[in-house]
Image (tube, rainbow, N blue to C red):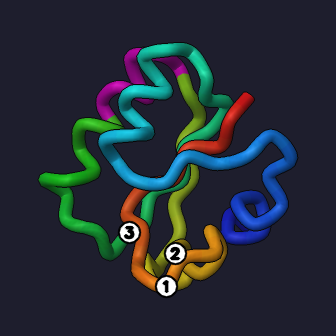
């Protein structure tokens, strides 16, 4: 399950779409996790760049649960798992 991947990421995670985009451009990401209930206007840029850079994308059902897996109190629309 992708929530577990996020919670157990050995090299760390990057939370948020802006930070995930920046990290992907710097080739620091091995996988991206996107919440299905996030606004597509927010996650589309991450999905597009991940496809261009051939970064694997996983999806999860809930922003709230994704945020909890990251250890934050708010929902997360996108999380990048570092290389």
**Residue at horizontal 24%, vertical 37%?**
45
- What is the crowding at mark 3: few (fewer than 14 residues within 10 Å), some, or many (at least 20)? some
Tell me if 12 is positioned left or right of 74 in this view. Answer: right
Distance from the alpha carbon under mark 1 to that under mark 2:
7 Å
Residue depicted at 68% across the width and 35% down the height? 82
Residue at disc 3, secondary structure: loop
Residue 66, image x and y in percent? 54, 73
Numbered tag placed on residue 67 in the rendering: 2
* Residue 79 vertical placement versus 44 (above, below): below
User: Does residue 52 belong to the magenta stretch?
Assistant: yes
Q: Position of residue 6 (x, y in %)?
A: 70, 60
* Residue visible at 20% across and 53% down in the picture: 42
State the mark number for residue 73.
1
The part of the chain drawn in magenta is 48-54
Q: Which mark is residue 44?
A: none
Q: Is residue 37 left or right of residue 24?
A: left
- Which of the 4 quarters of the picture holds residue 36? bottom left
Name the residue carrying label 3: 36
Most frequent secondary structure within the magenta stretch: helix
Q: Check if mark 1's residue and mark 3's residue have beta carbons within 8 Å.
A: no
Front one among 36 and 7: 7
Going from the N terminus, do you reach mark 1 or mark 3 first?
A: 3
């Amino acid at each position: 399950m992708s929530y577990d991947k996020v919670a157990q990421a050995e090299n760390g995670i990057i939370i948020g779409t802006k930070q995930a985009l920046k990290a992907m451009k710097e080739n620091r990401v091995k996988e991206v996790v996107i919440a299905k209930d996030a606004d597509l206007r927010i996650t589309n840029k991450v999905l597009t760049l991940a496809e261009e850079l051939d970064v694997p994308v996983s999806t999860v059902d809930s922003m709230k649960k994704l945020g909890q897996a990251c250890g934050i109190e708010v929902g997360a629309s996108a999380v990048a798992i570092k290389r």
